[in-house]
Image (tube, rainbow, N blue to C red):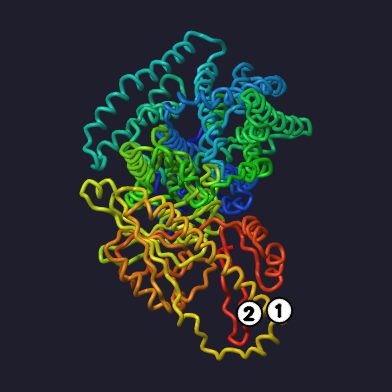
């Protein structure tokens, strides 16, 4: 190789040196292009994955680790060793590595275009996304102008006007893909702030692409010449042809594909070839090839074709090729090119002013739209997110000789630092508790029967949908009491960089999805959309929450709090097979259910799905759906009866309330009764005082049960002949099981309270073999395969926070003393959503002690 006067390296190589003959023939594999490329890819992926693991506790986006991986392998760290650089990253290998990295970039930008929808931009003006995006871009762009003058003094070959444009775009743009992942990390993806931030980032990216096209056109010419004008005109013509010629052709071709049929391999290969073709065209007219790939992705019809393309490309492009491009950007970064205290001072000042400028520009626009200051501050911090798009601009700038080594390193450091502080800053500024405002209707019982009824419905797969829809339909929406159903599609967050882009998808939103998630989301949204059209007085709002299973309950509880839900309905983690057995669909669902019960801001219902007929279909066939409430007593059972009470107003529902009453034998103790003298002497002991408190609380609960049943009898049963009330006297658990078996047959739905804190003779011995404690004793029995039931089961837990429990105790006749004495003699106030549960005690100890049950936390 030789070094010429134009400061360019000319590398000579033998075309036959692609694959080696092997080490046994005396060849060094690293002297050949293919083995060397494989080693480079392996080293880059290994380094980035290690950094992803190390930076995970600091909640850093994966793009940071991928860029830093290249920086470590480049001339800033390991590349300073001449031996390492010449062996692993010799100059002769740069062309192959950069070519493959740009191919990956080509298809990544194509996928970004596929996942976007221009229709979203058309609806953004109502949410001030346009003005927020422009406000967050203009201020940092203006701040970059004096820095461009300051830095341009040491860059004689760089044109000032083009450098100002590049620096302004890098400082002012917001990376849409990386921002989506950041919002998922900080649990803001489904909030209004998250939607506005994503919408503003989308507008920002669109503006940045336009500026990039002009920058490339101007960078190749000293002045605005005829060639520059032709490049801009060609770019506009290319976009028009794609939108008005190619897109209609693709629409017609997609419409010819039979519904439900897979996309043919020939069609997929044609689309992949189209990406290359569009990339070649834009490169030929003077623009970067990724611009053509991005525009081609935008015109792909949303639907099965999008899903098929993303399914085929997502893993390989995002997992292999994209990290290669980001690492190459790091390999080009030489931090030691930034030397001198003045340069580092300029760099620090540039980062500070760029961040502050974006934040201030966003805050001013938010205040103009009368948004709270802390929300404007949060949005401003989020808009500082940089990533893949900025790396493209920086690399294009260096290729076009707009940036030299020093300015390139400065731009990379600016992007890394600005992005790395986003998540910690948002965690500090935005407190999720601020949006948790108190509301009273947290239970079905507390909901006004003449007012709206809000329900949060959680769905894992389309298999959960039919029974949930029929359950909502049976909940009797009326003009006086409409149902507001918020459907939350639960999807596990994987390690993919763009998965979070569709977390806020809803029917009609125009937001696309990825992989099989989009197919499931479309099916779920379509089913609930049809339900809304066919059933009066029902409003449906669909959302998709993508998060790790370990924290998915936070999304569920957060949405329930935001939407003022009175009830959360979530599927059971087991599903029924063809032979009637119950098998695990996903064990992680059980943990989600437990966490929701533990942290829910309202009542929770776990649905064990064994099928449920539509009440509309039942009415047309002159039949009714049989619903049975198993009432043992306690707050959970009252909540279950309150929900069934609402269902009883539906003309297609026949409701049976079976109350289990302990018989006389249930109160007989196997130990001999104490003598009157012994009882009198023992009454002074604290154990008996605690026992009396237990009796007092049980009596109080019993009185509340009686009062609720009397109200139900007076207001519901007397006016509705389709309600049947049955009392069943039982002495032990076996009689309870026999009674349930006797009534379960022929009914479609069984509703039962979870019964946490319930101590009843009717359930003695039933909890010894409990497999699913989150269902309670009776719920676990009904969900087991041994019970051989064909009914769907809804297990309900009533919302009962500690403060509400204290208020109830203070308002009781025994009042304050009762509450504090219970704390003294073995009671603990339960956390939100939990009650008092018994702890088994040794037989000689007469006073039962209650404690918190062991849960997930």
Of residues 849 and 413, the one drawn nearer to the viewer in this rendering: 849
Decide: is 729 above or below 539. Answer: below
Lateral position of residue 711 relative to residue 364, left or right: left
What is the quadrant of residue 328 in the picture?
top right
Element at label 2: loop
What is the quadrant of residue 53 in the picture?
bottom right
Lateral position of residue 314 relative to residue 91, left or right: left
Say which residue appears at 32% left-offset and 52% top-offset.
Answer: 653
Say which residue appears at 57% left-offset and 47% top-offset.
Answer: 440
Query: Where is mark 2, residue-wise?
Result: 847
User: Mark 1 and mark 2 in contact (Cβ < 8 Å)?
Assistant: yes
Say which residue appears at 58% left-offset and 40% top-offset.
Answer: 330
Quadrant for the C terminus, please.
bottom right
Decide: is 847 above or below 801. Answer: below
Which one is earlier in the sequence, the residue at label 2 or at label 1?
1
Query: Looking at the picture, how far across and down is residue 410, in whole percent?
Result: 66, 33
Determine which of the numbered discs, if any, sits on residue 238 in the image. Answer: none
Can residue 397 be seen here? The reply is yes
Query: Looking at the picture, how far across and down is residue 262, in whole percent?
Result: 25, 43
Cα–Cα span, label 2 and label 1? 9 Å
Query: Looking at the picture, how far across and down is residue 502, in whole percent?
Result: 45, 40
Query: Where is mark 1, residue-wise?
Result: 686
Is the residue marked by circle 1 packed among few (<14), some (14-19), or many (20+) residues within 10 Å? some
Is the residue marked by circle 2 packed among few (<14), some (14-19), or many (20+) residues within 10 Å? many
């Amino acid at each position: 190789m030789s070094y010429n006067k134009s400061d360019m390296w000319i590398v000579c190589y033998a075309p036959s040196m692609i694959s080696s003959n092997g080490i046994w023939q005396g060849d060094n594999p690293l002297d050949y292009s293919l083995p060397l490329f494989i080693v480079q890819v392996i080293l880059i992926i290994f380094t980035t994955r290690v950094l992803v693991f190390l930076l995970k506790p600091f909640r850093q986006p994966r793009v940071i680790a991928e860029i830093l991986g290249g920086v470590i392998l480049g001339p800033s760290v390991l590349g300073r060793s001449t031996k390492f650089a010449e062996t692993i990253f010799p100059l002769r290998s740069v062309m192959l590595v950069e070519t493959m990295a740009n191919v990956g970039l080509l298809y990544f930008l194509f996928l970004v275009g596929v996942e976007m929808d221009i229709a979203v931009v058309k609806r953004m003006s109502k949410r001030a996304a346009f003005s927020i995006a422009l406000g967050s871009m203009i201020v940092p762009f203006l701040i970059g102008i004096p820095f461009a003058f300051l830095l341009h003094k040491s860059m004689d070959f760089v044109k000032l006007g083009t450098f100002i444009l590049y620096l302004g775009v890098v400082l002012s743009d917001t990376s849409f893909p990386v921002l989506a992942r950041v919002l998922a990390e900080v649990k803001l993806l489904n909030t209004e702030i998250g939607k506005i931030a994503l919408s503003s980032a989308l507008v920002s990216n669109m503006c940045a692409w336009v500026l990039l096209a002009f920058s490339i056109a101007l960078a190749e010419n000293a002045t605005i010449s005829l060639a520059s004008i032709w490049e801009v005109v060609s770019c506009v013509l290319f976009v028009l042809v794609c939108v008005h010629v190619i897109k209609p052709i693709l629409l017609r071709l997609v419409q010819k594909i039979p519904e439900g049929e897979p996309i043919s391999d020939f069609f997929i290969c044609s689309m992949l070839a189209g990406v290359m073709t569009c990339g070649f065209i834009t490169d030929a007219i003077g623009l970067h090839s990724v611009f053509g790939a991005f525009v081609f992705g935008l015109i792909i019809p949303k639907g099965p074709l999008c899903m098929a393309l993303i399914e085929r490309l997502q893993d390989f492009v995002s997992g292999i090729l994209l990290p290669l491009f980001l690492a190459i950007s790091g390999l080009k970064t030489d931090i030691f090119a930034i030397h001198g205290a003045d340069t580092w001072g300029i760099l620090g000042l540039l980062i500070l002013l760029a961040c502050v400028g974006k934040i201030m520009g966003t805050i001013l626009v938010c205040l103009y739209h009368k948004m709270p200051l802390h929300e404007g501050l949060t949005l401003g911090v989020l808009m500082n997110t940089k990533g893949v798009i900025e790396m493209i601009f920086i690399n294009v700038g260096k290729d076009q000789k707009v940036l030299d080594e020093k300015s390139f390193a400065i731009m990379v450091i600016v992007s890394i630092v600005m992005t790395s502080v986003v998540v910690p800053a948002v965690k500090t500024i935005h407190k999720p508790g601020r949006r948790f405002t108190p509301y009273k209707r947290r239970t079905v019982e507390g909901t006004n029967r003449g007012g709206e009824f809000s329900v949060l419905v959680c769905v894992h797969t389309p298999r959960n949908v039919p029974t949930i829809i029929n359950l909502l339909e049976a909940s009797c929406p009326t003009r006086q009491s409409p149902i507001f159903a918020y459907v939350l599609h639960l999807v596990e967050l994987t390690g993919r960089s763009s998965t979070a882009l569709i977390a806020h998808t809803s029917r009609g939103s125009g937001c696309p999805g990825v992989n099989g998630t989009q197919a499931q989301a479309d099916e779920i949204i379509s089913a609930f959309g049809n339900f809304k059209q066919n059933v009066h007085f029902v409003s449906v709002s669909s959302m998709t929450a993508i998060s790790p299973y370990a924290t998915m309950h936070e999304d569920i509880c957060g949405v329930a709090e935001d939407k003022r839900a009175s009830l959360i309905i979530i599927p059971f983690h087991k599903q029924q097979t063809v032979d009637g057995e119950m098998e695990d669909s996903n064990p992680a669902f059980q943990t989600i259910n437990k966490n929701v019960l533990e942290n829910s801001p309202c009542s929770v219902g776990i649905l064990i799905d064994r099928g449920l007929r539509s009440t509309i279909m039942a009415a047309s066939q002159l039949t009714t759906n049989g619903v049975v409430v198993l009432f043992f007593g306690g707050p959970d059972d009252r909540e279950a009866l309150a929900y069934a009470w609402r269902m009883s107003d539906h003309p297609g529902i026949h409701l049976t309330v079976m109350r289990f009453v302990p018989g006389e034998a249930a109160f007989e103790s196997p130990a001999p009764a104490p003598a009157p003298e012994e009882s009198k002497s023992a009454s002074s002991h604290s154990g008996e005082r605690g026992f009396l408190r237990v009796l007092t609380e049980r009596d109080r609960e019993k009185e509340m049960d009686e009062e609720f049943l009397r109200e139900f009898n007076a207001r519901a049963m007397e006016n509705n002949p389709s309600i049947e009330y049955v009392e069943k006297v039982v002495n032990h658990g076996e009689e309870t099981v026999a009674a349930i078996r006797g009534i379960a047959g022929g009914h479609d739905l069984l509703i039962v309270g979870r019964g946490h804190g319930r101590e009843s003779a009717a359930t003695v011995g039933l909890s010894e073999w409990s497999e699913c404690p989150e269902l309670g004793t009776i719920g676990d029995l009904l969900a087991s395969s041994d019970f051989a039931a064909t009914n769907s089961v809804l297990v309900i837990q009533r919302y009962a926070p500690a403060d509400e429990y204290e208020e109830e105790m203070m308002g009781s006749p025994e009042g304050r003393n009762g509450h504090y004495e219970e704390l003294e003699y073995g009671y603990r106030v339960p956390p939100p959503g939990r009650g008092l549960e018994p702890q088994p005690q040794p037989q000689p100890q007469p006073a039962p002690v209650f404690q918190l049950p062991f849960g997930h936390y």
